[in-house]
């Protein structure tokens, strides 16, 4: 056993790894800005525009499935070649996927954009497979959850900034003669690709300690004997599908005349409140579910975190660039008041959850259902803020569902984790269903579609997560 003086210092490697979380969060949410842009450029239906997410999140399923079968037959590839080399390869694949946007725009071919998204998502999938366990390994086992929560918070920072940066680059900085054209996409994605390559170089010359995972991956499908894992797989499908579908069409929702009638530029900026809400919820969730004994201290930390992150989002959403001139356009207190109310309701939901991952998941699901009804059946600023507020209640769902699903799997934990990652394919399917609904009944009523998703997640949170006695699944 290592003494305290000889315990490795993993701070620098962990900082490097958190940069990965930021960048893949950033590039993933860029799809939400890309969808309305491609929809207008190619005159697509909502269903056709939804193929953006189908190509992106479909890669998660196919790549994870392939990786799973390779692991079964030949052993874990990442464990064999090392986390560092795996991360570098994944970053370079992401860079290549971003570079493909240039010829796709040059030849003006929508299928080429979908192919570029698939390659980009292949790299992101491999990053997730490598970086999540590596972040957990870099340090003491008892603080692994804390490190992953921090990394996920940095990921949320990327998802918050992406709509603003992407909207400004596409609709302002690289607009051609003041108009957005298909050529406007070329330089931004070359910039993104360059960031992936630069990060690959940084990782190459960083000291990342080599670690190996000796855990045996069980053959066969024994993990599927556990009912709570099966329910959890569907819950992951529903959660990712619902979150991605809402984010995909929020810009079009805010542009609707019955809601706010915003321009694409302004709508893409306000999308930061959706992803910023996810950051508030995740960081507050990490505190709420922590081992802090004093409830008053816990709630104080949550309140401070919520206020600090809110003002970060408030500041970045005020940024404007018009005709090359930088300015700040702040929302007034009455305009922003509904979001304060939503943060307060989110805080109350945490209190009702009383530190239980399953109870918080169930309560948050009911909150999502209520907000989606309000967004779909009202109008103006009420519907606007209800839709954006869903980010607050979506926030903790991934971590809570994942943790509850693999509880008690023992030797089948790795296999169960692989099966759960495959269900990210929900992000490919549900946006298509919501897009088809929007083509038939309009974008606002289409926001009723994900209610089915959150009704199921509520079931999982309140009932479906129960772990059966071991002899019942033997």
Image: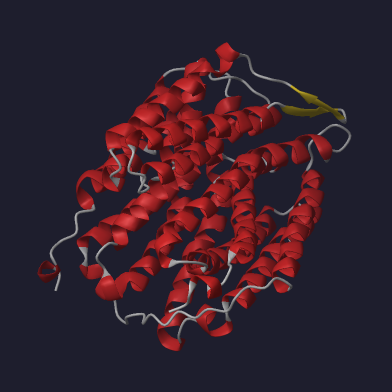
Query: Residue at the location (69% across, 43% down)?
Result: 42
Query: Residue at the location (69% across, 69% down)?
Result: 203
Tell me if 289 is positioned left or right of 199 in this view.
Answer: left
Query: Residue at the location (28% across, 33% down)?
Result: 352
Residue 101, compared with residue 136, is above or below; it is above
Find residue 427 and report its horizontal and vertical position in percent.
Answer: 47, 51
Residue at the far bottom: name it.
74
Query: Residue at the location (33% across, 68% down)?
Result: 416
Quarter residue 69 falls in = bottom left
Tell me if 153 is positioned left or right of 89 in this view.
Answer: left
The quadrant in which the C terminus is found is bottom left
Residue 318, compared with residue 275, is above or below; it is above
Camera-side residue of 440 and 3: 3
Q: Is residue 229 visible?
A: yes
Q: Is residue 375 visible?
A: no
Colouring method of the image: secondary structure
Tell me if 236 is positioned left or right of 103 in this view.
Answer: left
Residue at the far left: name it.
471
The quadrant in which the N terminus is found is bottom left
């Amino acid at each position: 056993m290592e003494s305290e003086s000889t315990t490795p210092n993993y701070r620098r490697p962990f900082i490097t790894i958190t940069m990965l979380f930021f960048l893949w969060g950033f590039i993933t949410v860029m799809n939400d800005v890309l969808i309305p842009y491609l929809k207008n450029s190619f005159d697509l239906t909502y269903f056709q525009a939804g193929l953006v997410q189908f190509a992106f999140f479909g890669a998660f399923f196919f790549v994870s499935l392939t990786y799973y079968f390779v692991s079964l037959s030949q052993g874990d590839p990442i464990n064999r070649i090392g986390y560092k080399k795996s991360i570098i390869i994944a970053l370079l694949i992401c860079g290549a996927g971003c570079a493909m946007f240039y010829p796709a725009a040059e030849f003006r071919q929508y299928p080429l954009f979908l192919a570029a998204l698939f390659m980009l998502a292949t790299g992101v999938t491999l990053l997730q497979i490598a970086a999540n366990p590596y972040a957990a390994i870099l340090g003491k086992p008892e603080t692994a959850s804390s490190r992953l929560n921090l990394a996920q918070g940095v990921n949320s920072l990327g998802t918050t900034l992406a709509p603003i940066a992407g909207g400004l680059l596409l609709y302002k900085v690289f607009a051609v003669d003041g108009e957005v054209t298909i050529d406007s996409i070329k330089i931004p994605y070359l910039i993104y690709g360059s960031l992936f390559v630069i990060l690959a170089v940084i990782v190459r010359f960083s000291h990342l300690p080599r670690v190996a995972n000796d855990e045996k991956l069980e053959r066969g499908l024994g993990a599927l004997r556990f009912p709570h894992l099966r329910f959890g797989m569907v819950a992951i499908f529903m959660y990712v599908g619902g979150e991605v579908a809402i984010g995909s069409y929020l810009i079009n929702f805010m542009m609707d005349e019955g809601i706010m009638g915003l321009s694409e530029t302004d709508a893409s900026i306000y999308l930061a409140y959706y992803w910023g809400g996810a950051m508030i919820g995740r960081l507050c969730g990490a505190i709420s579910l922590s081992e802090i004994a004093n409830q008053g201290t816990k709630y104080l930390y949550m309140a401070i975190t919520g206020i600090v992150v809110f003002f970060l989002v408030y500041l970045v959403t005020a940024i404007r660039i018009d005709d090359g001139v930088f300015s700040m356009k702040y929302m007034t207190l009455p305009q922003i008041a509904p979001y304060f109310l939503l943060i307060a309701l989110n805080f109350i939901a945490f209190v009702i959850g009383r530190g239980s991952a399953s109870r918080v998941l169930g309560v948050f699901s009911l909150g999502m259902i209520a907000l989606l009804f309000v967004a779909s059946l009202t109008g103006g600023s009420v519907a606007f803020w209800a839709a954006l507020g869903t980010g607050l209640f979506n926030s903790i769902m991934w971590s809570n569902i994942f943790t509850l699903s693999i509880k008690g799997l023992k030797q089948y934990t790795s296999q169960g984790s692989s099966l759960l990652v495959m269900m990210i394919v929900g992000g490919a399917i549900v946006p298509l269903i919501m897009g088809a609904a929007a083509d038939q009944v309009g974008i606002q009523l289409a926001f009723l579609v994900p209610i089915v998703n959150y009704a199921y997640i509520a079931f999982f949170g309140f009932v479906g997560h129960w772990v059966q006695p071991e002899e019942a699944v033997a």
